[in-house]
Amino acid sequence: MAGPTGRGNSLGAALNTLLRSQVTPRHRLSSYTARHWHAQLSQLTGTRRGYQALEDAGLGVTAQTLINWLSDPEYNIRRSYRDIIHTAYENAAVVPADPIPDHVKRGQFEISGVVRTGEDERERGTRRAAPLRIDGSRGTWDAIEERWLAGELTDDELEDHFIDDVIVADIGEGTDGWEFPGASYAVELR
């Protein structure tokens, strides 16, 4: 039975597609588009998450002050309060990434596409050649997960870390390192 598969124009893109199919990445909520402090405050005070963001940003005002501010969009508040509201709004708009699940880190990866090590370059995952099989449980996922949680895991970084921290940990350095110079890859998780 086939497992989830990621496809892309590079190994990193295919891995990122696969990863995003398994776990929610860090992302910005599309509903957070307000520009004026009053609209931002109105949206923040509509949810528990928003109140928490205001508290985390350091807004220390009474409930009555909030009511006064919300009742009059022209109310003149200090710039420092507007800055706190804006910071809280930006923080509430970002949904943190879920950690990479263990079933991914312990999974078996089958990579189809052009694989090169030293002078040996071949198309893997065809009728003539099996996919490159990698045991993810032998790898070290710390650097990948750190960048994933920070929302900074680009396709290129994921490819580099997957090669260095997972492929090499599982099957070794290869003849002269591992390269994936093709233009189309599929990565299946089993």
Image (spheres, helix red, strand yellow):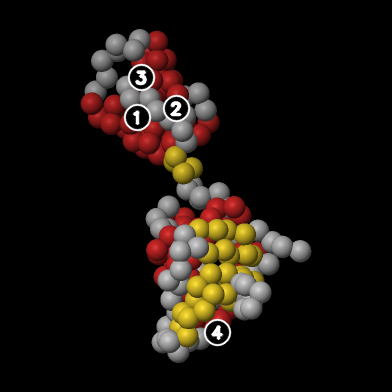
Q: Where is residue 76, by image quadrant?
A: top left
SS for callout 4: helix
Q: Which residue position holds label 3?
A: 38
Seen at 39% across and 32% down, the residue is 89
Please tell me which of labels 2 and 4 falls first in the chain. 2
> How far apart are labels 1 and 2 at the CA level?
9 Å
> How far apart are labels 1 and 4 at the CA level?
51 Å
Circle 3 packing at 10 Å, graded few (<14), some (14-19), many (20+), is many
> How far apart are labels 4 and 3 at the CA level?
57 Å
User: Is residue 67 found left or right of 98 in the rendered image?
Assistant: left
> How far apart are labels 2 and 4 at the CA level?
50 Å
Circle 1 packing at 10 Å, graded few (<14), some (14-19), many (20+), is many
Contact check, label 3 and label 1, Cβ < 8 Å? no
Q: Nearer the viewer, mark 1 or mark 4?
A: 4
Please tell me which of labels 1 and 4 falls first in the chain. 1
Closest to the observer: 73 or 171? 171
Q: Nearer the viewer, mark 2 or mark 4?
A: 4
User: Which label sits on residue 171?
Assistant: 4
Q: Which residue position holds label 1?
A: 85
Residue 86 to residue 8: above or below: above
Residue lying furthest left in this view?
79
Please tell me which of labels 1 and 2 falls first in the chain. 2
Seen at 53% across and 70% down, the residue is 113
Amino acid residing under circle 1? Ile
